[in-house]
Image: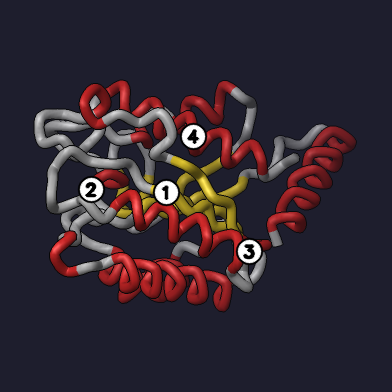
Amino acid sequence: MMKFLSIFICLMSICGSLHASPPVEITVLALGDSITEGGEHFVCYRKFLPKMLKAQRMSYTFIGPKKDSDSAHAGYSGKNTAYLASIIEDVYRQYPADVVLLHSGHNSFSKDKPVPGILRDTDSIVRTIIQINPRATILIAQVITAGKLPKYDYIPELNKKLADYVKYSEFADNMVLVDQDNRFDWTTDTVGDKVHPNVNGAKKMAAHWLEGIKNLSN
């Protein structure tokens, strides 16, 4: 279905040129935890991503049940992937975005060996979205690493499993893997809690999402 979205974007762009109408707006749902929602003492990628898209002359509208000065979103501070799986049907039926940006994997503990459960819940989110909107494209993030250890010792394993999931899933055509951990260094890219992004980290995350979105039209 990602191919369908690419064709759709191209066709609408052509139609817009022929009829001198504004370009079609693709809707985006940013889904995740506090790293998606943002907070008083750290910076969210949504502060930069809408501006980056605009600079690329890409017409994307963020939608969702919450809204701040940056954009609408579906970020839930302190919540894990299981929680997102439990609410995604209600959220997505209300906000059936063309593109979903999913960054989820924190708010669990290494001692609980959470990776299999996170993968199951990620798959549940994907299945629910595609059941509601078979044409949706879901950008699955390999999540940013954290220096809060041993709590987040499991993240490197999770990111490897997420890559396999996107590659081998029956819904692979609807998904794009976005390596948010690439070049993200918690020693320089997070605030004092060693988990949440600072300005530098948030800009890196926004740039990775931008590349993933740009790939949709290739």
Residue at figure coordinates x 54%, y 57% from the top left: 138
Label placed on residue 208: 4
Q: Earlier in the sequence, mark 2 or mark 4?
A: 2
The image quarter containing residue 144 is top left
Vertical placement of 23 versus 11: above or below?
above
Nearest the viewer among 21 and 32 is 32
- Closer mark to the observer between disc 1 and disc 2: 1
Give the alpha-carbon distance from disc 1 to disc 3, as whole Å: 15 Å
Q: Earlier in the sequence, mark 3 or mark 2?
A: 2
Q: Earlier in the sequence, mark 4 or mark 3?
A: 3
> What residue does disc 2 label?
34
Q: Secondary structure at mark 2?
A: helix
- Looking at the rendered structure, the kind of residue marked 3 is Ala
How many neighbours does mark 4 have within 10 angstroms: few (below 14), some (14-19), or many (20 or more)? Answer: many
- Looking at the rendered structure, the kind of residue marked 2 is Ser
> What residue does disc 3 label?
172
Give the alpha-carbon distance from disc 4 to disc 1, as whole Å: 11 Å
How many neighbours does mark 3 have within 10 angstroms: few (below 14), some (14-19), or many (20 or more)? Answer: some
Q: Secondary structure at mark 1?
A: strand
Residue at figure coordinates x 74%, y 46% from the top left: 9
Give the alpha-carbon distance from disc 4 to disc 3, as whole Å: 19 Å
Residue 118 falls left or right of residue 190: right
Give the alpha-carbon distance from disc 3 to disc 2, as whole Å: 27 Å
How many neighbours does mark 1 have within 10 angstroms: few (below 14), some (14-19), or many (20 or more)? Answer: many
- Looking at the rendered structure, the kind of residue marked 4 is His
Q: Earlier in the sequence, mark 4 or mark 1?
A: 1
